[in-house]
Image: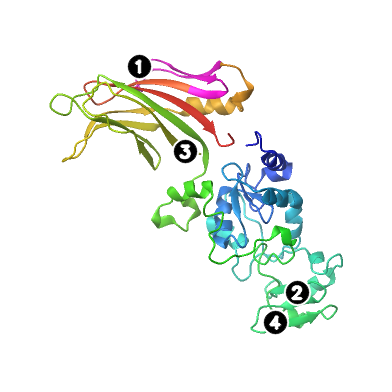
Amino acid sequence: MDGCFPGKRRLKDLLLQSDNRVCADCGAPDPKWASANIGVFICLKCCGVHRSLGTHISKVLSVTLDEWTDDEIDAMVEVGGNASANSIYEAFIPEGYSKPRADSGHEERAKFIRLDGNFKVFFCSCLFFGCGSILNIYPLVSNTELSLLGYQPGVGLIDIDGDDDALIPRGEVSVSHFVFRFCRSKYELQDFLKPSLRISSIPHKKSSLQSSLSWKIMDSFRSSSSSQNVEGMVEFIGMLKVKVLKGTNLAIRDMLSSDPYVVLTLGHQKIQTTVVKSNLNPVWNEELMLSVPQDFGAVKLEVYDHDTFSADDIMGEAEVDIQPMITSAMAFGDAGMFGNMQIGKWLKSNDNALIEDSTVNIIDGKVKQEVSLKLQNVESGEISLDIEWIPLDQ
């Protein structure tokens, strides 16, 4: 993630702080996302709720997938991490409220993070009047009758719940002014953050989040029926660069030959090579990219004969077990720190399509694997692949 980018190195160092190793909102371990303007690291499930608030409240970015500006990284560093941010946002948690846990459902998470009436009333009291404290007002505030307030620097608290803003001058705090909600949420107003940490809402301009790499990938895997459901999102751990080299002795599906092409499927992703006309020993040498989700399975490989006027005919299939490669790669970490060496092996067996054992190697700082497959459920045919593992921080 860092390489020649010192800004990303600063972000990575911040993420390694002990308080940032868990989600700021639910405590789930190893957060991979962040709210760039609020300054907290969050997990995938909580980032879905943050995203639903809108980028004017919480600008969610992937720590590894997205490009960060220097200003965004400076803002994260300035906040100082989850503990520092939560000392402000969670300084006062009224009775009856509790933080969600890592295993909490979406509704419980959303109730804590999002605006919904009696929600997240935990602002640090000292922020209302700068270095002055108004701790003495807390006993006057009912946990169920909380006022929606803003703060105008140098003036005091402002009731912004009604049609007309009712000014509450400094020193004139009373119970009647707190019959409303005390404040909207941990994140909604952001009235007490430094201006550099806030996001201004700019009409008619596409947000950088909408064009970010991580959300482009995640949106491509979100079904229409779950567009508002965080469970429909996918978190990726890396990418596979699959080079489809060649086919050998493929099956005949036309009069004397076939027009073969290869289809690779991983989860909801499906990509294919070009069609090679009238060739039973085609050479493709094409590179195809697949994003690997956290809960990945085998890559399904299928070979088809292209037909113009009828459905394409199947010419065999096989599965590629990517577990040995990914496990080995993650065990060794940064492959660039090692010389050329073997780090793993996928063994040939009666349960897979391997022609011979397939070793996982570090070659010139990259994790690679050569795979030769005998096509299944067909009379003949072999496929040769070169696979490279690309971690998200590369």
Residue 92: which quarter of the image? bottom right
Tag 1, which secondary structure? loop
Instruction: Tell me the residue that label 1 is attached to.
Output: 355
Mark 4, Cα crowd under 10 Å, few <14 / some 14-19 / many 20+, is few
Q: Is the C terminus in the top left, top right, bottom left or bottom right quadrant? A: top right
User: Is residue 90 something one can see in this rendering?
Assistant: no
Residue 352, above or below 11: above
Label 2–label 4 contact, CB within 8 A: no
Element type at marker 3?
A: strand
Q: Position of residue 120 (x, y in %)?
A: 66, 64
Give the residues in magenta.
Answer: 341-368
Report which quarter residue 151 is drawn in: bottom right
Lower position in the chain sequence, tag 2 or tag 4:
2
Per the image, the residue denoted by label 4 is 165
In space, the residues marked 2 and 3 are separated at their CA atoms by: 50 Å
- Cβ atoms under marks 2 and 1 closer than 8 Å: no
**Is residue 212 covered in magenta?**
no
Mark 1 neighbour density, 10 Å: few (under 14) some (14–19) many (20 or more): some
Q: Disc 3 marks which amino acid? A: Ser
User: Which residue is the site of mark 2?
Assistant: 141
Task: Identify which amino acid the numbered label 4 is placed on.
Answer: Asp
Task: Farthest residue to the left: give it.
Answer: 255
